[in-house]
Image (tube, rainbow, N blue to C red):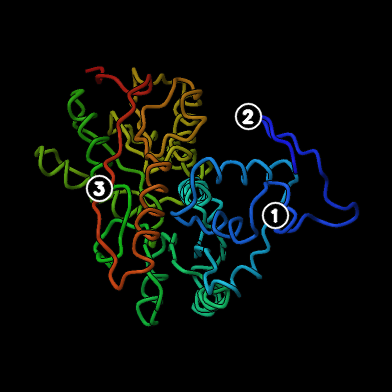
Amino acid sequence: MPEFATKDVTVTEQTPKGRAPSIRDVARLAGVSHQTVSRVLNHHPSIRPETKQRVLDVMTEVQYQPNRAARALVTSRSRTIGILSASSTQYGPASSIAAIEAAAREAGYWVSTANIDATDDRSIADGLAHLIAQGIEGLVVIAPQVRVFDTLAERSIDVPYVSLQSTGRDPEHALSVDQIAGARLATRHLIELGHRDIYHLAGPQDWIEAEARMRGFLDEMSASDVPTTAPILGDWTADFGYYAGRELLTIRDFTAIFSSNDQMALGLMHAVRDAGLEIPRDVSIIGFDDIPEAAHFWPPLTTVRQDFAELGRRCVALLVGTIDSSTLEHRGSIVPELIVRGSTGAPAF
């Protein structure tokens, strides 16, 4: 009979050398049946906590890796969530994917990601077909571009799915950070500091987040009866922020700029310094996202923080809770948080 310590498992019997441990090896070493190990793998509620922990400890000790294909054949369950993603190199989509992967692992699910070209209808369709062919049980669409949702609307998706976007498209399946509310927080902060001449450096026109943040800016300016100028459409990069800042500073008809993301805000700050001006004495700048480096810009950047970890948890909980149901329960958006740092202040009149 194998011998175990109370907390840290000590396996006194080993699996044969030259092959990976099997489910029967785990069962033998844990002193249980292989059916019990299978129930642990499938999160069966009838397993006693101490038995489950003993099996998990043995799996860790012998570095057991479940055969996902074999399990799917036996259970008709892949326990896989698919992610259809465009622009995954950008901070927001990449952070969303990481959060969903962490939450899925915690819930006992795997994640398979298909990266697509949002400008190519064929790429979108192929990405979706690739995921469906893997037998996914739920789908997350992280595609900020409008065209992706237009293409998906033309196709039938026969698994529960959630789309991470915050405008009016496909509201029954939407779950997101409230981008409009976040933009209003940023704009209101500048107005409350006394700014009235505020520019908005927006993201690309085909991005849903850019559209939502622009709407939030315009809504808050209108609600406060502050005159607006047409937003400037950017491309999310610091380079664009820098060159846009240089052009704007030749006019100097503003005291504050709300940038639709932190990278463009970084470029703006560079342009202001190159012009011999100071932040926030001469120009206040506020960003969006709170990327890890934002607190280390000089001065540290005031920005809007999105809780990607909470977004991932809600997304997976929503899917896992409805995989065996015919309907997807709708849940509200997550309200972001304003993070005030040194890059904003009262205007110097």
Q: Residues within 10 Å of mark 3 (few under 14, many from 20)?
A: many
Label drawn at residue 180: 3
Q: Height in image: 321 above or below 220?
A: below
Label drawn at residue 6: 2
Q: Residue at x 27, y 35 (%)?
A: 186
Q: Which type of secondary structure does the marked residue at label 1 adopt?
A: loop
Q: Is residue 315 left or right of residue 270?
A: left
Name the front one of labels 1 and 2.
Answer: 2
Q: Is residue 300 visible?
A: yes
Label drawn at residue 65: 1
Q: Is residue 295 left or right of residue 171?
A: right
Q: Earlier in the sequence, mark 3 or mark 2?
A: 2
CA gap, disc 3 and disc 2: 53 Å
Q: Image quarter for residue 337?
A: top left
Q: Residue at x 75, y 43 (%)?
A: 1
> The C terminus is located in which quarter?
top left
Kind of residue at disc 3: Ile
